[in-house]
Image (spheres, rainbow, N blue to C red):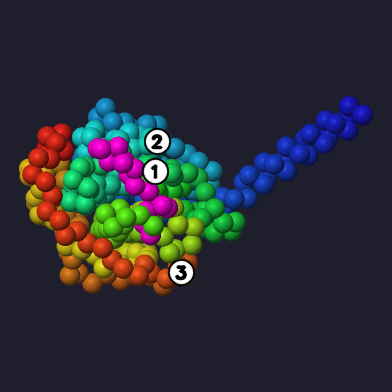
């Protein structure tokens, strides 16, 4: 009897181990451009270590999963916008998020609500899995720390705005804010997915995947009109800042608004594009909190 129990336990353990490995394709190899972009980002000092951005040990996951130079990001915007929970991502993704937050999210929040964002709610950063956790699919950009799923935002006045509840069902301000920051995301990230795309009803997915050999193609679904970037709000410098010694030219400005953008075939998009598009019409208040006016 004891021998049979030991045998069944061993078989069960092997079966669970095999089942756990089946979700991650063993044949997929890590593309050379990934480590190259991470190293270039770190050398450029586009992201620097701080109390809220902490370098952590290299991640070697199953198969090709992993991040050579991962960062534990607790907050963005010089510590003024917390990330909940902490996100483990790579340097390029951190740099892109910083610019999106400073140039799109904060100006939009002040315009629509009169107060800035103090927290971004994320539901997936580094995670060794396939795309949409589908068996047999290619690895997700999450498996390389090159993606972040944003589910909502917390404002300075305590209001929480979520993609699931407010992208289609919120009031005019909530819908307008979410649609603006989603559409602007198409300028800062190589992949931008949101409600209307299968598996993305409750979050915005942003990543820096290469959709063509040159890394210039962008995939944005649902495809929405991209509003013009705002000018300065108080002392907040918004878009098209000149590159500095700490920010390489490639990261200094998003893609020009009138630049043609090539999209790969829309294979996974389902459902209609949102019927309306809301863009801000109000003038933001002049008294922006100083912690957000650096």
User: What separation in Å lies between label 3 and label 2 (alpha carbons)?
Assistant: 30 Å
Say whether residue 157 is magenta. Answer: yes
Q: Give the extent of the magenta segment.
A: 153-168
Q: Secondary structure at mark 2?
A: strand
First reached walking from the N terminus: tag 1 or tag 2: 2
Report which residue position mark 3 lands on: 271
* Pair 3/2: label in front: 3
Q: Residues within 10 Å of mark 2 (few under 14, many from 20)?
A: some
Q: Secondary structure at mark 1?
A: strand
Q: Residue at x 62, y 46 (%)?
A: 21
Q: Residue furthest right?
A: 1
First reached walking from the N terminus: tag 3 or tag 2: 2
Residue 103 in the image, given as x and y percentages of width and height: 18, 50
Report which residue position mark 1 lands on: 122
Callout 1–callout 2 Cβ contact below 8 Å:
yes
Q: Residue at x 31, y 31 (%)?
A: 54
User: What separation in Å lies between label 3 and label 1 (alpha carbons)?
Assistant: 24 Å
Residue 195 in the image, given as x and y percentages of width and height: 41, 60
């Amino acid at each position: 009897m004891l021998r049979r129990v030991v045998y069944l336990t061993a078989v069960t353990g092997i079966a669970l181990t095999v089942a756990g490995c089946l979700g991650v394709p063993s044949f997929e190899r890590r593309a050379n451009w990934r480590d190259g972009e991470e190293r270039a980002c770190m050398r450029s000092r586009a992201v620097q270590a701080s109390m809220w951005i902490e370098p952590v040990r290299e991640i070697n996951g199953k198969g090709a999963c992993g991040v050579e130079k991962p960062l534990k990001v607790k907050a963005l915007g010089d510590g003024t916008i917390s990330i909940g929970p902490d996100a483990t991502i790579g340097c390029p993704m951190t740099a892109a998020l910083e610019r999106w937050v400073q140039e799109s999210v904060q100006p939009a929040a002040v315009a629509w609500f009169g107060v800035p964002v103090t927290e971004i709610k994320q539901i997936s950063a580094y995670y060794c899995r396939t795309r949409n956790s589908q068996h047999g699919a290619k690895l997700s950009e999450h498996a390389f720390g090159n993606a972040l799923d944003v589910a909502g935002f917390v404002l300075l006045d305590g209001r929480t705005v979520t993609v699931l509840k407010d992208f289609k069902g919120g009031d005019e301000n909530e819908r307008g804010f979410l649609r603006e920051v989603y559409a602007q995301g198409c300028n800062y990230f190589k992949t931008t997915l949101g409600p209307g795309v299968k598996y993305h009803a409750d979050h915005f997915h942003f990543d820096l995947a290469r959709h063509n050999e040159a890394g210039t193609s962008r995939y944005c679904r649902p495809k929405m009109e991209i509003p013009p970037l705002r000018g300065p709000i108080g002392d907040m410098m918004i878009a098209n800042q000149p590159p500095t010694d700490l920010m390489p030219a490639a990261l200094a400005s998003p893609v020009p608004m009138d630049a043609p953008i090539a999209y790969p075939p829309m294979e996974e998009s389902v459902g209609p594009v949102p019927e309306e598009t809301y863009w801000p019409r109000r003038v933001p208040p002049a008294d922006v909190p100083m912690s957000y006016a650096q």
